[in-house]
């Protein structure tokens, strides 16, 4: 199975400041159709996961534009341009290549 | 609105089976794959498998093959996941989730709508 590695695993943040999380894959996630099959989710404390970014760089419906996804192949990044207090939680990357899904270990984002 | 509503919490003894249902509303059930994901207490997300609500085709993570059965009933817009041979390691919140794109695109993509989760506790 494809292994996803996230860094850092814990990220203290300051509201108003930028933040970024890295996700690296053990294999290229570039699909034959030309898309990167890599998504980002946020699970806020006590809540269900919510989709932030799909296909590497597309914001899901209703996601604020302070969230952006980039990268291709094996290296991906989620950026928050200006962190807000409501952004705390665990961020997961997920790959769906070949119809078999794996998640990264998660990055816990918390206020300093 | 588009939503997935799951069945209620379950408490089971080791060796038993549990069946979790997931009922869709606000969209055409057959148009989107359903994924199943679980989360043990304090742990990360673990993919279990998917089902194509239109054809009934399914795929399971290797870890769950032989123990998990995925089914769907198009007439009532419900997908179900049955897990047998329960152990304490199966204590978790179980989620169903809808794949963002239509079935013609395949199951490989993000999950944009999630059920509220079903807590399954395995205890003697």
Image (spheres, coloured by chain):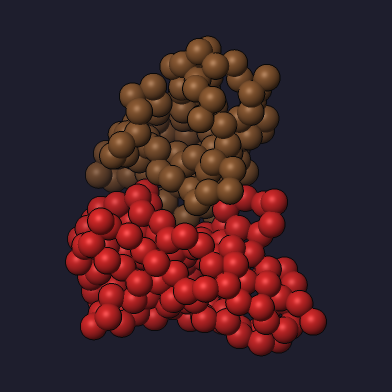
Chain colours: A brown, B red
Q: Which residue is at 61% across, 20% downward?
A: A13
Closest to the observer, A55 or A83 = A83
Up the image or down, B37 lies above or below A73; here it is: below
Q: Position of residue A43 (x, y in %)?
A: 53, 43
Q: Which residue is at 41% across, 56% downward?
A: B114
Closest to the observer, A29 or A103 = A103
Residue furthest to the right in view is: B124
Q: Position of residue B51 (x, y in %)?
A: 37, 71
Q: From where the camera sits, is residue B39 visible?
A: yes
Residue B118 position by quadrant: bottom right
Closest to the observer, B102 or A109 = A109
Q: Which residue is at 31% across, 68% downward?
A: B24
Up the image or down, A87 lies above or below B43; here it is: above
Q: Quadrant of the N terminus of chain B?
A: bottom left
Residue furthest to the top in view is: A17
Q: Quadrant of the C terminus of chain B?
A: bottom right
Question: In the picture provided, is A93 more to the left or to the right than B52?
Answer: right
Residue B123 position by quadrant: bottom right
């Amino acid at each position: 199975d494809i292994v996803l590695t996230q860094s850092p695993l814990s990220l203290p943040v300051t509201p108003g400041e930028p933040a970024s999380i890295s996700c690296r894959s053990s294999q290229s996630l570039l699909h034959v159709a030309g898309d990167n099959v890599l998504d980002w989710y946020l699970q806020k404390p006590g809540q269900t996961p919510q989709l932030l970014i799909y296909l590497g760089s597309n914001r899901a419906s209703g996601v604020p534009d302070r969230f952006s996804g980039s990268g291709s192949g094996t290296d991906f990044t989620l950026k928050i341009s200006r962190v807000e207090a409501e952004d705390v939680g665990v961020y997961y990357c997920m790959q769906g290549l070949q119809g078999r899904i794996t998640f990264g270990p998660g990055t816990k984002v918390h206020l300093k | 609105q588009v939503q997935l509503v799951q069945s209620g919490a379950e408490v089971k003894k080791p060796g038993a089976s549990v069946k979790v249902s997931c009922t869709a509303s606000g969209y055409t059930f057959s148009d989107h794959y359903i994924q199943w994901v679980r989360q043990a207490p304090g742990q990360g997300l673990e993919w279990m498998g998917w089902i194509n609500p239109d054809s009934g085709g399914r795929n399971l993570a290797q870890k769950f093959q032989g123990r998990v059965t995925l089914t769907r009933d198009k007439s009532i817009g419900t997908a179900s996941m049955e897990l047998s041979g329960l152990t304490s390691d199966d204590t978790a919140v179980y989620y169903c989730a809808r794949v963002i794109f239509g079935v013609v695109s395949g199951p490989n993509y993000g999950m944009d709508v999630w059920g509220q989760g079903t807590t399954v506790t395995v205890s003697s």
